[in-house]
Image: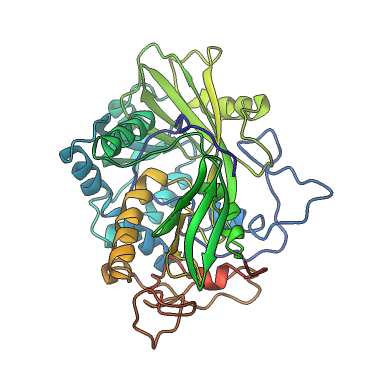
Amino acid sequence: MRGRRLPRQRGLGQPRPGRPGPRPRPARRRRARLPRPGRPAAHRPRRAAPPHPLVPAVPAQLHPRPPRPRARALAMLGRRTFPLLDQLAEDGVEFTRTRTDFLAVAQDPRAAEAYLGSLDPLRQAGFDLPATVLGGDELREVEPALSGRVRAGVLLRDHVQTEPDSLVAGLTAHLRAEGVRVDEGVAVTGVSARGGEVEAVTTTAGERRVGALVIATGAKAGALATRLGRRLPVVGGRGYSFDVPAERLPHASTLLLDAHVACAPMGGRLRVSGGMDFRRGPARPVPERIDAITRGAAPMVVGVDWTDRRHAWAGDRPLAPDGLPVVDRVPGYANAYLATGYSMLGLTLSGPAAEALATFLVDGCAPRSWSPSVPTASAPGDTLPKRTDHVGGTGDRATGRRGGAPGAHASATPLTGTRDAMRAHRHPE
């Protein structure tokens, strides 16, 4: 794990409990047709690289409608998103947030209808969501920056726009003011464990004794899990963003369904985000990917100077095989935990996941209110690990101990099941 300072956050800053994505679905294809490199999503396989089990899952996640129980699982998580943001503000964390509209628009009305249908599990979870698709003229009354090519879409009123940089900086400053030590530019190079408990981590700044270890490093979480002798099937789906000037800045955050591109007003410019790559190595902006995103967005939004693209950025989203978060105890360890796999819903899911994980750390079991029903069985032909559908999914269900030796009660929620997913391929000394 290479040490670095807290990175700049260049995503759209959109907590979206009213919008699932990517759609949670176990992989059902051994072969998959992936978009060409000039499209917003692309995969560049290397001849020498073995295939990763997640790659065939991507088309299944992005296109068919999700299994309802898994979509409901994300919906239940999302119900805590806005209250937790309010709580941060009440606790004195300073960050930028604005309540605004969210639009999902398309040239093809069928895409808007499909998107509206995908919101059914969220509506059943209690979200106030629209029942009908709006026409192009109605959408342009809400957002005049939409071009004449927009023919249909969905308007969501329950939306919050944040500045990701301000949230990270504000939370870090608040923690330090409360006496919490936050180190930047320090790399973890090793983990020491004995008897199923992590005792210390070795870093570039020396050894640190720990009472508990939480691995929450996004797409790179697998590197530390490996040091504990576990394989975590989470990989990085690389996305890109940049910003452009607009004659009249759109006021609504907008998802362009045809191009799989999102736009949001931020910092006096329009931030544009999209793409899905499975590349290795450092995340850097790739000109052909930025060009592809621009081609998808330009016909849909008017009054934008697409030649003045600035602040190009690339980052890896942590993707699990079935599209659900991995928030669980590391199998075989009483005091090591994982929190990753939020895909493109980091701001939406990280708060509720952290709340549940805090309860897990203190009480030894995940809240049952965070346990919507998720089926255990997968269809024939699935090649990826299965999830559990009960509390206690990572250990012995008959054991009620808190902590304990490897194999003791671990109280997983249906959004975890990492004992099956994390196959032991070596055992630490």
- Residue reaching furthest bottom? 398
Q: Position of residue 361 (x, y in %)?
A: 33, 63
Q: Position of residue 193 (x, y in %)?
A: 53, 64
> According to the image, what is the colour scheme of the structure?
rainbow
Left/right placement of residue 20 relative to residue 308 reads: left
Looking at the image, which is closer to me, 221 or 322? Answer: 221
Left/right placement of residue 369 relative to residue 243 reads: left
Quadrant location of residue 14?
top left
Q: Is residue 72 above or below residue 172?
A: below
Q: Residue at x 71, y 39 (%)?
A: 36
Q: Position of residue 187 (x, y in %)?
A: 55, 41
Can residue 207 be seen at all in this image of the molecule? yes
Q: Is residue 36 above or below residue 372?
A: above
Q: Residue at x 46, y 29 (%)?
A: 8
- Total marks in image: 0
Looking at the image, which is closer to me, 399 or 345? Answer: 399
Quarter holding the C terminus is: bottom right
Q: Is residue 417 above or below residue 74?
A: below
Quadrant location of residue 60?
bottom right
Looking at the image, which is closer to me, 326 or 31? Answer: 326
Looking at the image, which is closer to me, 136 or 161? Answer: 161
Q: Residue at x 54, y 27 (%)?
A: 313
Can residue 149 be seen at all in this image of the molecule? no
Q: Position of residue 34 (x, y in %)?
A: 69, 48
